[in-house]
Image (tube, rainbow, N blue to C red):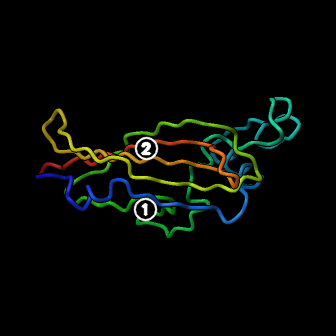
Amino acid sequence: MSLLTPELRALVGTSVVYTAPEPLGRAAIRYFALAVGDDNPVYTDDAAAREAGYDGVVAPPTLVCETNQYAGLPRDGDGYAGHGWGIELPGTRQVRGGNSYVFHRPVRPDDVITATWTLAAADERTTSAGQDMLILTSRAEYTNQDGEPLVSNEETIIYVAVTP
């Protein structure tokens, strides 16, 4: 049975865009640093950030990639309110394949983030155990209010057929 249906194949190349309603802000930066347990002072102290070569406080690198803070999406069945393609494949289990990030420049509190997600590829393969699997590759480009690139993210989600 093919996991790559014509409907899924037709989604390849689809893009969605989310733009934050306001600048990222110092509070979001501080809260994220606290949440991930990173006490680097460049996230909370302008003097420390300047000493490190920045113009002021900067965000922890992956904060901008958490679209749940600005996408305005409803929570899914797992409580997640960020970007997802909403693809459900009965008879499979979903596995995160990973992310590959390219950081173009540090994100500042006054940046207004726009995330453009594109479903870049859908490839069908077989596991070493003979199970069908579908590998979805998404690309996200994060820019600021001036169109400057901030982060590029390639994300892989794998759907593996569950054997009865």
Dividing the picture into quadrants, the one containing residue 155 is: top left
**Along the horizontal axis of the image, is 107 left or right of 78?**
right
Secondary structure at numbered mark 2: strand
**Along the horizontal axis of the image, is 149 left or right of 7?**
right
Q: State the residue lying farthest toward the top.
A: 52
Q: State the residue lying farthest toward the bottom.
A: 74
Q: Earlier in the sequence, mark 1 or mark 2?
A: 1
The span from disc 1 to disc 2 (Cα, nearest Å) is: 19 Å
Residue type indicated by callout 2: Glu
**Residue identified by numbered label 2:** 155
- Residue 5: where, in percent of width, then height? 20, 57
Relative to residue 85, is residue 94 depicted above or below? Answer: above
Query: Residue at the location (44% across, 58% down)?
Result: 15
Query: Residue at the location (77% across, 53% down)?
Result: 110
Query: Residue at the location (39% across, 52% down)?
Result: 119
Secondary structure at numbered mark 1: loop
Residue type indicated by callout 1: Asp
Relative to residue 52, is residue 120 depicted above or below? Answer: below
Query: Residue at the location (63% across, 43% down)?
Result: 150
**Residue identified by numbered label 1:** 78
Q: State the residue lying farthest toward the front.
A: 147
**Along the horizontal axis of the image, is 80 left or right of 119?**
right
Nearest to the observer: residue 134 or residue 116: 116
